[in-house]
Image (spheres, rainbow, N blue to C red):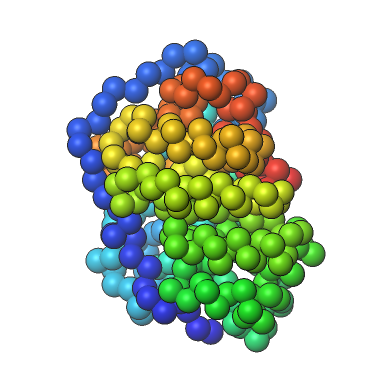
Amino acid sequence: MTFSSARPSRRDFLVTGAAAAAVATTGLAADVGAQSDTDPGWIDAHVHVWTPDVAKYPISPRFKVADMQPASFTPDQLLDQCKPVGVRRIVLIQMSFYEFDHRYMLHAMRTHPGAFSGVALIDFRDKHLVDRIDELQKQGVRGFRIPTDGKTDRWVDDPGMAKLWQTAAVRGLAICPLINPQDISSVDALCERYPETTVVIDHFARVGVSGTIESVPLANLCQLARHPNTHVKTSAFYALGMKTPPYDDLKPMIRKVYDSFGPERLMWASDCPYQVDAPHTYQASIALVRDRIGFLSDSDKQWMLRGTAEKVFFA
């Protein structure tokens, strides 16, 4: 099977900010700490896990062990971050180190039943594409990630991409594009052509990764809201805008996508382990949505912190 042309560069996407600011933990935050055993808890819609045991779970030859930073981020290490703030379910996103070998992600899902859903990497040019989709769906995968390959202008007319989007619609699975702002128009065209397909845009389509929340790309992202099955992850705060906790500079962008999509099509996600690279913290990520945005009602927070991801990845 082939893979996207350029090797994904998480190191390029991971950037550090200034010293961490204090994060308010009032109101709804206090309720989180008091959740009962019957409370469904929050959902983190985007996390990567990997193991240093490369003998049992080898990484792709296109990567080196030194590329795995941090060296280890296992499900147990992840849950140590999630549990203190009331996150009880997580959507695992296949890590590029493993490319199309999903054994480690699927192992994590099997050994923590009910805690994890999964989004797989998929080669849309695989001649056995539909069989592969069905195989992964049977093992709990609920979506397929498409990394940008520098050729997104060709996606609309690619027969493999057509089969992927059509099959996902029939199977009730999500397409999850990891794209840059210049790729939004290509995804827009695909959403137009395949309106029944559930789509989840990762990380605001990376609007703001340059350090500035550019108005035109943000407007283009918001234009996707006219497709009723398209959603956006409000995520990867560590990498956008000023890249500094408590991320208050991202509030205007969140307001724009909120006004366009509504809370029912937005989902919060951390993008761990990158979100816990100092000075960034897991607490700071969830606190932005949970505590610091005045225009969000309690109902809005329920959707963004649980309801939307539950609907797409756990229902």
Taking 230 as reference, is 61 above or below it? below
| Residue 71 visible in image | no
Residue at the limit of the structure toward the front, as seen here: 216
Residue at the limit of the structure toward the right, as seen here: 170
Q: Is residue 71 rendered to the left or right of residue 136?
A: left
Quarter-wise, where is residue 253 in the image?
Answer: top left
Residue 53: percent from the left, percent from the top?
37, 64
Report the number of discs. 0
Taking 162 as reference, is 35 above or below it? above
Residue 137: percent from the left, percent from the top?
69, 63
Q: Is residue 52 rendered to the left or right of residue 224?
A: left
Q: Residue at x 60, y 40 (%)?
A: 260
Taking 187 as reference, is 298 above or below it? above
| Residue 234 visible in image | yes
Quarter-wise, where is residue 177 in the image?
Answer: bottom right
Q: Is residue 65 rendered to the left or right of residue 130?
A: left
What is the quadrant of the C terminus in the image? top right
Residue 84: percent from the left, percent from the top?
45, 28
Residue 116: percent from the left, percent from the top?
59, 48
